[in-house]
Image: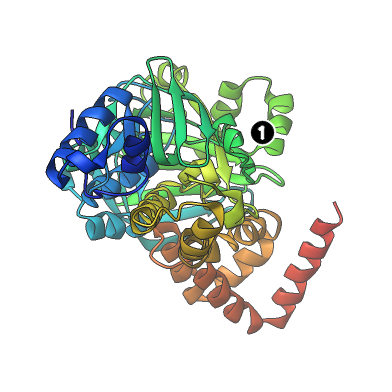
Amino acid sequence: MHGAAILPHPIGFSLMHLKSEVLSQSSLNKRNYRDAYISYSLTMNMYEAVVIGAGPAGSTAAYVLAKRGLKTLLLEKYKFPRHKSCAAGISVYTKNLLKELGLYSDKIILHETTKAKLTFVRYNKTYEMKSLIATSTRELFDEYLAKQAERAGAELHEEEPAYKISVGKNYVEVYTKKSTYKCKACIIACGVPEKLSSYAGIKTVYGKALAFEFDAPLSEDYDLDYTLFYYALEKDYAGYFWIFPKKDFANYGVGSWLNTVVQLKKKYGYLQKWVEAAMKTLGYWDKIPEVEKYLKEIRGAIVPVYTEAKPENMIADRVLVIGDSAGLVRHTGEGICFAIESGKLAAEAIADLFEEDKLDKESLIKYYGAKIERNILSELKYTTRIADALTYCTGVVIDLLDKEPKAVELLGKTLEHSIPDNVYYEETKKLLKKHPFLLMKMLKMYLRRRKY
């Protein structure tokens, strides 16, 4: 078992536990004491950290924890490779972060585009921009990261989901159908927020969006240099349709807020009919061979988009909630970037605070919460504003894009995520201020929107 013989901290909770329940230190030197701890911990399923969920967030956290020398268990519900409903776009932000962590490999990239086209369908307006977006599949990407965590020393258990945790004063118990594990710190990284967090007294705050996607061949005339985004498919449609090329095939998908999906379901009856209508509107229905066959394989998932969560909504004594489980998803639906970032920050916080056992909620908020606020939430606080502008102030956005080439350039940068959303928002606002009429028009639309 990977990581079974790792014990960088010869003092602390685990050894204190041994002192009172198993051994007397007086007759042991440090080497014997270490060996006794290892033997005991193997018997009692004790770990210094347990990470629940081996997606990008959990695997990154387990990787960093193992690299820092903590005995780490990584639990995954399914056997790899497994599917996740996701376009699996790899942004500039994500790629840079993977390189920083020593996790990047060309093997996880199926294709890279250098440009993007964004179309506002109801307005018949298309904008072309430079935008570097790589693509993968979650089957490939997630398994790669989990195996990297395992190679770093984490112990990976596939097909072993946790169904409950119990937080004690000195440890956390993690329950699966196969066993019960004890640890000093637990990281929850299960994807969509679920009841596991509630066992620690954490209530995740997030907005419910839904995404539906399927893989199918590319049309013969598709230009592989481009990733495609289609906004304003229908009136007040919050979200977009995408095409992410992956060389000989593409991922087609559509995402929107839950209330929009409910309204569209009433209109079309079935999900497939909605997507079929969108593809016919966009001209792809007759271009893709056997598209109906592929559409039958459409899959969906909740996308927990950030709304107003604060660090205290992600932290409890000895427990951190990260990635999608914490609602750290951008307005574009991109969650991989902050899954990896929060996994890194969470693991670093636990490793830094582990020696002195300062893993109470207050200490974690001061240490981890401050980093989350600075590195992630400072950007995500603008995500709803950007989404609202694209959805409910579309006419103003189009006028600005027509008048200001810089606005088009900035849009490309936010799609590839080479600039933070707060920078995109502030820079776009500066451009808007050059056109007082457009600024007033947008403010009126916002005020009208807030009444409902």
**Point 48% across, 48% down: residue:** 229
282 and 340: which is toward the camera: 340
Q: Which residue is at the far bottom? A: 434
**Point 60% across, 54% down: residue:** 312
Q: Percent from the top left, x then y, of residue 171?
A: 45, 38
**Point 24% across, 48% down: residue:** 10
Q: Given the image, on which type of amino acid does mark 1 rest?
A: Val
Q: Which residue is at the far front? A: 26
Query: Left of 359 or right of it: where is 234?
Result: right
The quadrant holding residue 393 is: bottom right
393 and 329: which is toward the camera: 329
The quadrant holding residue 375 is: bottom left
Question: Would you say residue 380 is visible in this rendering?
Answer: yes
319 and 382: which is toward the camera: 319
**Point 18% across, 33% down: residue:** 2
SS at badge 1: helix
Q: Percent from the top left, x then y, of residue 329?
A: 51, 49
In the picture shown, does residue 214 fall above or below 309? above
Q: Percent from the top left, x then y, of residue 283?
A: 48, 36
Please tell me how crowded label 1 is: few (under 14), some (14-19), or many (20+) other residues with Cα within 10 Å.
many
331 and 197: which is toward the camera: 197
Query: Left of 342 or right of it: where is 150?
Result: left
Query: Left of 97 or right of it: where is 181?
Result: right
Label 1 sits on residue: 261
In the picture shown, does residue 334 fall above or below 99? above
